[in-house]
Amino acid sequence: MIRVENLSKCFALHNQGGAIIPVMAGAELVVAPGECVGLVGQSGAGKSTLMRMIYGNYLSNGGRILVGGLDVAQADPRQIIHLRRAVLGHVSQFLRVVPRVPTLQVVAEPLLRLGHPTAEAEARAATLLARLNVPERLWSLSPTTFSGGEQQRVNIARGFVHDYPALLLDEPTASLDAVNRAVVLSLIEEAKARGAAILGIFHDEGARNRVCDRLIDVSRFTPEVAV
Ligand SMILES: Nc1ncnc2c1ncn2[C@@H]1O[C@H](COP(=O)(O)OP(=O)(O)OP(=O)(O)O)[C@@H](O)[C@H]1O
């Protein structure tokens, strides 16, 4: 479902004399349907950079990134938008939303964009928000003023509202209490059980051990010159 082949990445520092910094070379990985793979490696090894390339936020300098048959490294923006809408979900650490949109709508939005009826999308959003213990009195408010943990739970609800075949998770349990952490780990296990291919960064070792089938150390892909 997710396949990375011989991927490389350099950053060009335009404000520092155009210095070229190679940060990744020869990266290879496969995530099969129903599998959760954790990215590990010391700080600066390239975990976030690899995730951003797979999501299409960063361009790569060589290699292939296949997600559901599309090569993200070569895809045009329209193809990437379609991929993100239907195939590749992403739960980042921070919620980024349009101000003044109510929480229920923020969570239902991915389903509405896919053409699901409003009542069905909102019912699914409500189920997830309730499961993640976001109080119902908050659902009609914009999440912009919510606490860090509340925002993260809204973000997780939005990321799991559609049954994406592939999911990228960036520290999904980072600012959660034990009860909500357990809910998120169950959501990940349920996504695996329905066949989602999941790639994640989990600094929470207990979470990683519970949900990851394999770990990949990205420092294997750090080019010699950058060490
Ligand atoms: N936008 C950028 N411009 C220049 N260099 C960058 C940029 N983003 C990342 N880097 C560099 O790429 C390397 C990998 O960074 P990255 O953030 O992917 O590491 P990481 O493994 O996710 O680290 P951490 O665990 O600390 O989040 C680092 O040396 C970093 O300085």
Image: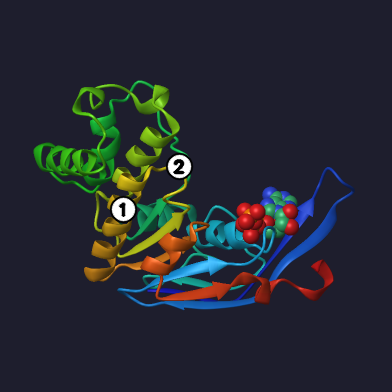
* Badge 2 vs badge 1, beta-carbon distance below 8 Å: no
Percent x, y of residue 194: 21, 68
The residue nearer to you, when weighing 158 against 182, is 182
- Please determine whether, in this image, residue 129 is positioned above or below residue 181: above
Does residue 171 sit above or below 130 in this rendering?
below
Q: Residues within 10 Å of mark 2 (few under 14, many from 20)?
A: some
Q: How many marks?
A: 2
- Which colour style is shown? rainbow
Looking at marks 2 and 1 on the same chain, the residue that comes earlier in the sequence is marked by 2
Q: Nearer the viewer, residue 157 or 150?
A: 150
Q: Quadrant of residue 151?
A: top left
Taking the spot 66% from the left edge, 77% from the top edge, the residue there is 220
Q: Position of residue 20 (x, y in %)?
A: 82, 59
Residue type at mark 1 is Ala
Dot 1 alpha-carbon crowd within 10 angstroms: few under 14, some 14 to 19, many 20 or more: some
Q: Residue at x 25, y 32 (%)?
A: 105
Q: Mark 2 — residue? A: 175
Task: Determine the residue positioned at 23% across, 29% down.
Answer: 135
The amino acid at mark 2 is Ser
- The response on whether ligand 1 sits within 8 Å of label 1 is no
Where's the C terminus, which quadrant? bottom right
Residue 74 drawn above or below residue 153: below
Residue 78: horizontal and vertical position, in percent? 43, 53
Ligand number 1: quarter of image? bottom right
Residues 140 and 65: in front is 140
| Tag shown at residue 182 | 1
Quarter holding the N terminus is bottom left
Q: Is residue 78 left or right of residue 110?
A: right
Secondary element at tag 1: helix
Gap between marks 2 and 1 measured at Cα? 13 Å
